[in-house]
Structure formats: C-alpha cells, structure tokens
Amino acid sequence: MSQTITIDPVTRLEGHGKITIQLNGQGEVEDAHFHVTQVRGFERFSEGRPFYEMPSLMARICGICPVSHLIASAKACEAIMSVRIPHTAAQLRRMMNLAQMVQSHALSFFYLASPDLLLGMESDPKVRNILGVAAAKPELGRGGVALRRFGQSIIELLGEKRVHPGWVVPGGVTEPLSTEKRDKILAMIPEAYANIALALGAYKKIADTFKAEIAVFANFPSNYMSLINEDESIEFTDGALRLIDAKGSTVEDGITATRYTEVIGEAVEPYSYTKFAYYKPLGYPEGSYRVGPLARLNIVKKMGTPKAEKELAEFKQLAPGLVESSFHYHHARLVEMLYGVERIEEILADSRILDKHVRATAGVNRLEGAGQAEAPRGVLHHHYKVDENGKMTWANLVIATGQNNKAMNLGVLQAAKHYIKNGKFTEGILNRVEAVVRTFDPCLSCSTHAFGQMPLAITLVSAEGEELDKVVRG
Amino acid sequence: MSVETDVKTLVIDEQEVSARAGQTILEVARENDINIPTLCHLEGLSDVGACRLCLVEIKGSNKLLPACLATVQEGMEVSTNTERLQKHRRTILELLFAERNHICSVCVSNGHCELQTLGQEQGLTHIRLPYRNPELNVDASHERFTLDHNRCILCTRCVRVCSEIEGAHIWDVMGRGINSLIISDLHQDWGSSACTRCGKCVQVCPTGALFDKSKIGSDHPKYPEFLPYLNLMREAQ
C-alpha cells in the first residue's frame, strides 16, 4: 500500500506552504511536491489605480523585501513615463536595495537557517530556533540581530520607515540624503564588517559537517538567471539579465525588462498557487532555472569590491564547474552581504550622493512599461499597462520564488528520496526536507502576491489517497 | 446698541466665555481654546453642517446642534465633549470609513489625512459596520490632478472653494444620500471640464480624494490655511 506524508505548515519560511511526499507500495518515495497554499490578487486589484501609486501599493505584497518591489515597480512606471532618473537617485535606490538585501539575508541566515546549521538538523525542535541559537552561540545570535538592524536602519534613515518606505517613487526618490544621515550610515559599517566576518568564519567551520545534506539538497544541474553588469560584475538594481545553462554557457544575454516577457513564460501546476517560470525557447519544464544568491554567484565573473572578490573566488571553488547544491545558497548569502556593505560604503564615498536633484517628472508617455530588480531571493519583474490617463489596466508580476519553484520541487523530491526508506521517517528527516526549501529562502507571500503569515505542514498519503501520517507545525 | 457690539455671555464646558452676537458656537469655542472636532468646516469657507462631527449639547434642549452653524445665545450652557457626543462622533467616523474604500496604508494622504487624524483622536480602533466596498471610479483625466471617489467623504469643501473663492463652480454634487457623487461640470470628465486648474480644491480636500498627479504618500502635504489670508487680502482691496 502506498502512502503520502504531508508537512503542513513548513516552518521558518516567509509565507504559508506545505510539502506532500507520495510513497509507493514498497515505502519508497514516488513523488514529492512543495505547495504554496495562499491566494492574494494584487495584480487584479491594482486595475483602475493611477500608475504612480503602484510602487507603494505593490510594496505591500511583502514586509521582507518591499524595497525590491518598490524599485521594480518604480522602474516599470519610469518606462511608462519614459524618463531616466537622476544619477544620485539611482545610487540612493541602489543603496536602499543593498541594505534590504543585507537585512533579508541576515533574516534568512540567522533567524531561519542557522538553527539547522548551528544546532543540527536533528536537534530538539523546541529549541531549534533563533532563541536557541542565541543561547548556544550568543555572539552569532547578537551578530545576526545587529546585521538585520544595520540593513533596516539604513532603510529607515533613507525612507523614514523600516518597512514600506514611501521614499522610492516613479522618477526617483522624494528626499535627498543629508550629510548627517550619510555619516550615521558610515558609522555603522565597521560593526557590519565584523559581524559578517564572524558569520563567514562560523559557517565555513561547520559547512564540512553537512556533506550529506549538500549532496542531496537540490543538488542537480540547472539553468540560472540573474542581473549582471556589462563588466560581468554582480548587480542588484540595474544592468540586464543573463541566463546560463547547466554548463555555465550563456544561453541568452542582455534580457532587459522589456524583453523579459518575450523569453520568460509562466506555467501552472495544479498543486501550487505559485506559477512556474521557464525560459520559453526551451519550454517547460526543461527551461526552468534557478535565481537568487546561488544563481548570481554562478553567473557573475566578479563582485567588483575587494573583500567580496576574495570570497567569490573561494565560493567558486566549492564545486568543479558551477556550484549546484542549493545548500550553498547559505554561503552565497554571506558573500553577498559582505558585498552589500562594501558597495554601500563605496556609494557613500562619492560626494555626488548628497546632490539635491533626485527626481524626474513626466506624465504618461507610453501605455506599457516593465521594470526588474534583484530581490534578495532572486529576479523580480513588474510589467504594467495603463490607459491614456495613466490608470492601470493590467499588471503582471514574476517573483523570484516562482522562478525557483521547479527547482524547489525537484529538491524536495531529491531529499525525500534519499532520506525516506521503507516508509519510515523521523522528525529530523522531515526537518531536512523542509530545510531544502529553506535554502532557497522563498517568499511565499510574494510568490502568490497573497494574504497571511508563515507556517508549514508534511502529509504521508497512500496510493489510494488515504492520509497515513501528518506532522503539523504552526 | 448695534448688533456688532452686542456681547453675549455663555458657558462652554463649564467655562464662562463672552462672544459677539452672531458668532457660532464653534468660533467662540476655538477662540477660547476649546476643541470641537470638525471635518466639513474650513475657515474661509461657508458652513453647511454636513458632517455632524461638531454636534454639541445645549442645556435644556434634547436636540444636538452643529457648532459650526448654531449661533451663541445669552446664558447658553454648551457641552462639547460628553460621552454621548463622543459616541456619536465615533459612529459618524465609522460610517464614513465603512461607506467607501479608505485604505490608509496605500493612500496618498496617509499621515496627513483629516479623517485619519480624527479617527485617531476619537479613539477609533475598529469599524463595527460591514464595509460597503463600492466600485467607484478614479477620474485621472485632468492634466495635473486626480479625483478618487473611493476616498471622498462628500464634505463638499471642493464644491464650496471652487464656487465661493475661485468663482468657477466646476464642482457640484449629484444623486442623493449614499449615492451622492462629486461631479465636475454636468457630470463630465474633470479633464474636459471648464476647470481653471487653480488647485484650491486639492488643497482643501481633507482626505486623499483630490490630489496632485504623480504625488504619493508622505510626498503630498496640503495647505488649506491659505484660505483666510486669501479672503483677508480680497476684502482689503
């Protein structure tokens, strides 16, 4: 008799999701799915609103990466206005996007992932959380909190609010940066470096103990896509997208926001409210690809900042060819955080950052526009259509989690097949299956543009569809 | 003795005050630093007593009177902040919030909206009534401004400022009761109306119903206090 295991809800993720694992008559894993179970509808209710409201409206999709939505949305609006924003505005936005990346990565690494990494996959689930980490490794716990604060404080200094700042607007930003605020940010930088060094050191020490997980945590060849600059360095805010294949060869380069829809399609699977993005010329599912820290570091040839450059070189040594195991997303996040802090320091060193001209204005000059940016968890794409008065008639959002969706599902299947034998599983095994999803740091709220908060559940279902076992956490 | 010099004495919230005959209770209360909440009232415009937030109790009368329209009488005893009045004010605000689609978090006036501020001041924590969620139009046809009916509370400040100060009378109200709607000219798009583009209606609008195009959030403070100065300068000429 076959059975299905359901993990519902999956914990330590942004949003609601569940995992089902289908077992055959011999108790071997037949199939596994990661389901995103919430529905929202931002694309629908933005219809009829003036387009320049879109950044603040769309930022409400998510409290973790609102800045990426603000930026992708503002860029789509600027395409409609046909304006090029002032250099200082572009740099200020870049800084805010990097600050958000640092805080979001800190959240993912320290709050969501580090309990598995530092306390162990099999550790007592009652203390396998950030408080458990803080008790066992107080220095790292404090460092994580401080890094999150670093990013959030920069966002607050620039936009007056930590979450959903209204500062990013179509055409630029509402307020220039003052000398006083610049100096406050600069003063926070040394501590941020120290904390990232601490985390990198700790991670590298323990990474070797996870060889088994590295081998089966979504460890397979895939395509990757991310923004990249013309000089092949990492980029989060501007640049264009590059898609590479499993061997690392460029499949498509210079994908601008406007071209994005020509080459990227979205497939639907009955088991998830999150769509599955794919590269159209290869079709679905062959054209599926991964995005986010792992994709970015696999694609770029350099970081463009000295400290992160060394770390990138080391990262690329993790595997021959491309780094394929999603377990290495954790490591990639730490490298990117280091880059973020270095880049923020560089941006602030240029006196033009204090320029007062930070906004361009224009009305509706085109009836369609698209914008893209790197959210912490991967490429984010906003695409709008408006009428001649600037009222929204149509919107489509492609979210990082949708682009990682196929890989997450395959990763869950790979880990489940490896760990679950003869229909037997323990809490620690199920935690490993969940941990596969955690490596991607998916944002389920974003991916469905939906309502709700976080938890996940695993169910074991028989071939006859009978529910055999269920582990729920909420 | 002329009317202008006729002094009335009365009591507002147990405070003895004096006033000129013909003054409204609201005027006298504000001269004496007694706060009465208002929404449709705006200094510099005529009063219509539409929002009923300024209702006050008069000793010896069962009727509640709008302080913006009721004139002072000799020996009057006025209460401006009784439990009954507070309850009424909260209910009025709840009705306003439930009537159309007021979503503060994504509104252009978030942080400087008179309706939002009143809700906070009056201790509004919940809307006990079901939201009506009407499907209302956004008129973005004007070159410089936008009208969002979803956020309109029908205070008619825009109608009055356009008629009384600008002299254009582009705005008016159509329909009755809950179906009332602010319209420009004879119910045509604002962009094709005879609007002079002065922007006074935008400045006096207490919510985010009228706003500058391309402005959002904290970006859009309004300055309705220009009205008394405008009137003063005109009278001086």
Image (cartoon, coloured by chain):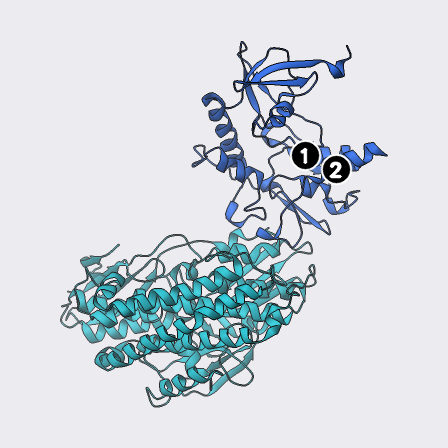
Chain colours: A cyan, B blue
Q: Position of residue B126 (x, y in %)?
A: 43, 36
Tell me the residue at 64%/16% (across/down): B72
Q: Can residue A442 be seen in the rendering of this structure?
A: no
Number of the front mark, 1 or 2: 2
Q: Position of residue B26 (x, y in %)?
A: 62, 24
Q: Amino acid at mark 2?
A: Tyr
Q: Amino acid at mark 1?
A: Arg
- Label 2: how many residues lie within 10 Å, few (<14), some (14-19) or many (20+)? few
- The chain holding disc 1 is B
Q: Which residue bears the numbered disc 2?
A: B229
In the image, A357 versus B133, the foreground residue is: A357
In the image, A317 versus A156, the foreground residue is: A156
Alpha carbon separation for disc pair 1 and 2: 17 Å
Residue A132 image label: none
Q: Quadrant of residue A91?
A: bottom right
- Is residue B89 found left or right of A427 in the rendered image? right
Q: Position of residue A471 (x, y in %)?
A: 20, 58
In the image, B1 versus A390, the foreground residue is: B1
| Helix, strand or loop at mark 2 | helix
Q: Quadrant of the N terminus of chain A?
A: bottom left
Q: Which residue bears the numbered disc 1?
A: B157
- Is residue B151 found left or right of A42 in the rendered image? right
Query: Pointers 1 and 2 in contact (CB under 8 A)?
Result: no
Q: Vertically, is B100 above or below A429?
A: above
- Is residue A198 found left or right of A78 in the rendered image? left
Q: Quadrant of the C terminus of chain A?
A: bottom left
Q: Can residue B135 be seen in the rendering of this structure?
A: yes
